[in-house]
């Protein structure tokens, strides 16, 4: 039995045949995400991270639709892409990480968004596991 989340992450990187899925999320964190036009959120970026935590992690975990063999990577889209999470198991720890991303001290929207480099980065993350047992999204 695994003792820590770090051990789980290490095992998942070594045993890619155990991955159920790998989802790569591209999140716009350009300067426009500072606007405060989203009901129930301080700004657009706050709304995105809350929605991802609630709808992409919490809901499926509670419904038994995702587990720690469903991995998530996140690419932040700005002028240059930044990978902020790589192959994270879907669990309550990831839920809390998404909530932490709401804070501008953790990740701040700025600059211009550039889609193509972010998509290229997402494609390289998808190629981390090309086994037939892993659904890619």
Image (cartoon, grey):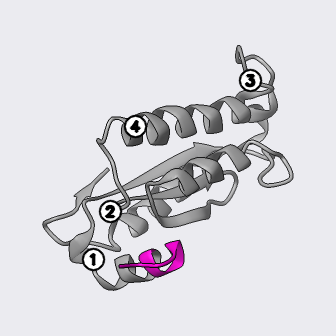
How far separated are the C-alphas under marks 4 and 1?
A: 25 Å
**Residue 2, horizontal then vertical, whole percent:** 41, 78
How far separated are the C-alphas under marks 3 and 1?
A: 37 Å
Question: Which residue in the protein does label 3 denote?
Answer: 41
Whether 130 is drawn above or below 80: the answer is below
Question: Which residue in the protein does label 4 denote?
Answer: 62
Whether 125 is drawn above or below 59: the answer is below
The region drawn magenta spans 1-8
**Residue 90, horizontal then vertical, whole percent:** 43, 55
Counting residues from the start of the chain, the first of labels 3 and 1 encountered is: 1
Whether residue 108 is in magenta: the answer is: no
Question: Which residue in the protein does label 1 denote?
Answer: 16
How far separated are the C-alphas under marks 3 and 4?
A: 23 Å
Q: What residue is shown at x 21% (from left), y 63% (from top)? A: 134
Q: Secondary structure at mark 3?
A: loop
Does the residue at mark 3 contact the one at mark 1 (Cβ under 8 Å)? no
- Tell me if mark 2 has few (under 14), some (14-19) or many (20+) residues whose alpha carbon lies within 10 angstroms of its own: many
Counting residues from the start of the chain, the first of labels 3 and 4 encountered is: 3
Counting residues from the start of the chain, the first of labels 1 and 2 encountered is: 1
Q: Nearer the viewer, mark 1 or mark 2?
A: 2
> Residue 11 or 83: which is nearer the viewer?
11
How far separated are the C-alphas under marks 1 and 2?
A: 10 Å
How far separated are the C-alphas under marks 2 and 4?
A: 15 Å
Q: Quadrant of residue 51?
A: top right
- Report the disc number at residue 74: none
Residue situated furthest bottom in the rendering: 14
Q: Nearer the viewer, mark 3 or mark 4?
A: 4
């Amino acid at each position: 039995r695994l003792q820590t989340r770090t051990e789980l992450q290490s095992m998942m990187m070594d045993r890619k045949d155990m991955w159920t899925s790998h989802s790569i999320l591209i999140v716009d964190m350009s300067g426009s995400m500072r606007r405060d036009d989203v009901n129930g959120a301080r700004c657009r970026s706050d709304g995105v991270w809350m929605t991802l935590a609630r709808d992409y992690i919490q809901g499926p975990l509670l419904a038994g639709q995702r587990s720690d063999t469903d991995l998530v990577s996140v690419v932040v889209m700005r002028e240059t892409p930044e990978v902020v999470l790589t192959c994270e198991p879907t669990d309550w720890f990831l839920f809390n990480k998404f909530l932490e991303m709401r804070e501008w001290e953790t990740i701040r929207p700025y600059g211009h968004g550039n889609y193509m480099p972010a998509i290229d980065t997402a494609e390289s993350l998808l190629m981390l596991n090309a086994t037939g047992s892993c659904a890619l999204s």
